[in-house]
Image: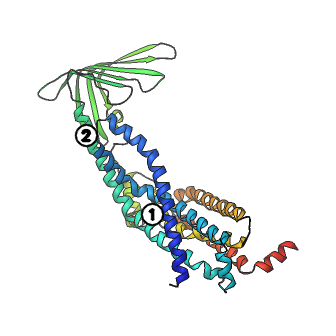
């Protein structure tokens, strides 16, 4: 690698780290506020909050990498252009293809990072995150077994048990659910049992009464029941239900064992196939995005007024690529055999790169044609 390549690559990596840190911080702060409220409401400490935050970071980083790699490339090329460094390099005989080589190296490095995230780190972290949330839900459930005390496991819910017998029977249970502003639902039961199944903790109430009060018209509807099952997991944490999602699975399973996974998870095979190929497409996007930004900014050449028009064009092309990705989602999910469409944005981006770089290689000819 030449000194010029190392110089450009070092600047790209430095700005990439900066933009990634900023975007991850912004995304994490928004997510952390909600997570912190949930954990504090359930009585968890700061250690649990830190643990869940670390487990969620790989997925956050995966989301911001394409934006970071594009922003870093545009910023660096804009600065090199405004300081006439690119003009000097072109005057020494560097072609646009030669100037784009460090940007290609940069995209490949980030693509390797993205591949490690999508294929290994993100699935593993999501599995651990789900298991940890399940353990937290079970711990919170055990704290609900407090007799003689009105408990508030979450906003709008009140829970009371008069007595807990030695054999685990809950006596005289009261549960008030006021989370829906349109109505208040109150359950009372002589006995209840707290059980755990595959979908989460359940409260089985026996010989009770359900009262639904409508706040809109003031009506009260009462229903007697001999037994009733209440999903206590939704009271504790809506996200704490253990479930096997395709994002938790390894890429090899998604691509080569999609029929079995479709039967086990009851998820359409097209969704599974799209997830598997989408992980490769995400890595390719980190190569295409910076090259698109570089090519568009290079066409503009040097200008005292900067290259803001080219930056806007590059951003519009990026939006077009994302819209193409969205347009390919439903066809692949509905027809798994159409999985090559997942790579359509990367292919379209490659065509744009070669076309724009060709224009940058022949600027005089292109300007003459545009004037004509």
Instruction: Tell me the crowding category of disc 2: few under 14, some 14 to 19, or many 20 or more residues within 10 angstroms, Cα based.
Output: some
Residue 231 sits in which quadrant? top left
Instruction: Tell me the crowding category of disc 1: few under 14, some 14 to 19, or many 20 or more residues within 10 angstroms, Cα based.
Output: many
Camera-nearest label, 1 or 2 = 2
Q: Name the residue carrying label 2.
A: 138
Is residue 221 visible in the rendered image? The answer is yes
Q: CA distance from mark 1 to mark 2?
A: 32 Å
Residue 118, percent across and down? 42, 63
Residue 350 higher or lower than 37, as above or below: below
> Of 290 and 186, which appears nearest the observer?
290
In the picture, measured across the screen, residue 255 lies left or right of residue 232, that is right
Residue 91 higher or lower than 187, as above or below: below
In the picture, measured across the screen, residue 367 lies left or right of residue 132, that is right
Image color mode: rainbow
Residue plotted at (51% across, 65% down): 16
- Quadrant (top left/top right/bottom left/bottom right) for the C terminus: bottom right
Residue plotted at (75% across, 81% down): 362
SS assignment at label 2: helix
Q: How many marks can you see?
A: 2
Residue plotted at (26% across, 44% down): 135
N-terminal-most mark, 1 or 2: 2
In the picture, measured across the screen, residue 70 lies left or right of residue 313, that is left
Residue 196 sits in which quadrant? top left
What number is the disc on residue 213? none
From this viewpoint, which residue is outermost toward the left?
166
Residue 354 sits in which quadrant? bottom right
SS assignment at label 1: helix
Residue 209, percent across and down? 32, 18
Residue 352, percent across and down? 66, 71
Q: Name the residue carrying label 1.
A: 276
Residue 276, percent across and down? 45, 63
């Amino acid at each position: 690698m030449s000194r010029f390549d190392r110089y450009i690559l070092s600047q790209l990596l430095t700005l990439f780290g900066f933009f990634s840190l900023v975007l991850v911080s912004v995304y994490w702060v928004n997510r952390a506020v909600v997570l912190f409220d949930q954990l504090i409401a359930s009585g968890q400490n700061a250690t649990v909050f830190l643990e869940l935050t670390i487990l969620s970071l790989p997925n956050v980083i995966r989301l911001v990498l394409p934006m970071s790699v594009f922003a870093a490339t545009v910023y660096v090329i804009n600065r090199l252009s405004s300081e006439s460094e690119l003009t000097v390099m072109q005057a020494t005989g560097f072609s646009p293809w030669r100037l784009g080589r460090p940007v290609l190296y940069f995209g490949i490095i980030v693509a390797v990072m993205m591949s490690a995230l999508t294929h290994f780190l993100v699935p593993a972290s999501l599995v651990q995150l789900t298991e940890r949330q399940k353990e937290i839900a079970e711990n919170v459930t055990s704290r609900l077994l407090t007799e003689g005390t009105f408990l508030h496991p979450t906003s709008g819910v009140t829970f009371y048990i008069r007595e807990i017998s030695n054999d685990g029977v809950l006596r005289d249970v009261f549960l008030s659910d006021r989370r829906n502003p349109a109505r208040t639902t109150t359950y009372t039961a002589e006995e209840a049992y707290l059980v755990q199944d595959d979908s989460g903790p359940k409260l089985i109430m026996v010989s009770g009464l359900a009262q639904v009060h409508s706040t809109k018209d003031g009506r009260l509807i009462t229903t007697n029941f001999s037994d009733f099952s209440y999903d206590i997991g939704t009271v504790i944490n809506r996200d704490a239900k253990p479930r096997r999602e395709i994002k938790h699975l390894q890429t090899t399973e998604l691509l080569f064992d999609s029929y079995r996974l479709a039967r086990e998870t009851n998820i359409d095979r097209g969704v599974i196939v799209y997830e598997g190929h989408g992980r490769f497409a995400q890595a390719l996007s980190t190569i295409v995005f910076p090259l698109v930004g570089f090519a568009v900014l290079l066409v503009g050449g040097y200008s005292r007024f900067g290259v803001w028009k080219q930056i806007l064009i590059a951003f519009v092309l990026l939006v077009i690529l994302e819209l193409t990705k969205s347009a390919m989602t439903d066809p692949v999910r509905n027809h798994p055999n159409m999985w090559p469409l997942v790579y359509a944005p990367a292919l379209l981006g490659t065509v744009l790169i070669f076309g724009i770089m060709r224009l940058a290689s022949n600027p005089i000819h292109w300007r003459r044609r545009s004037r004509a």
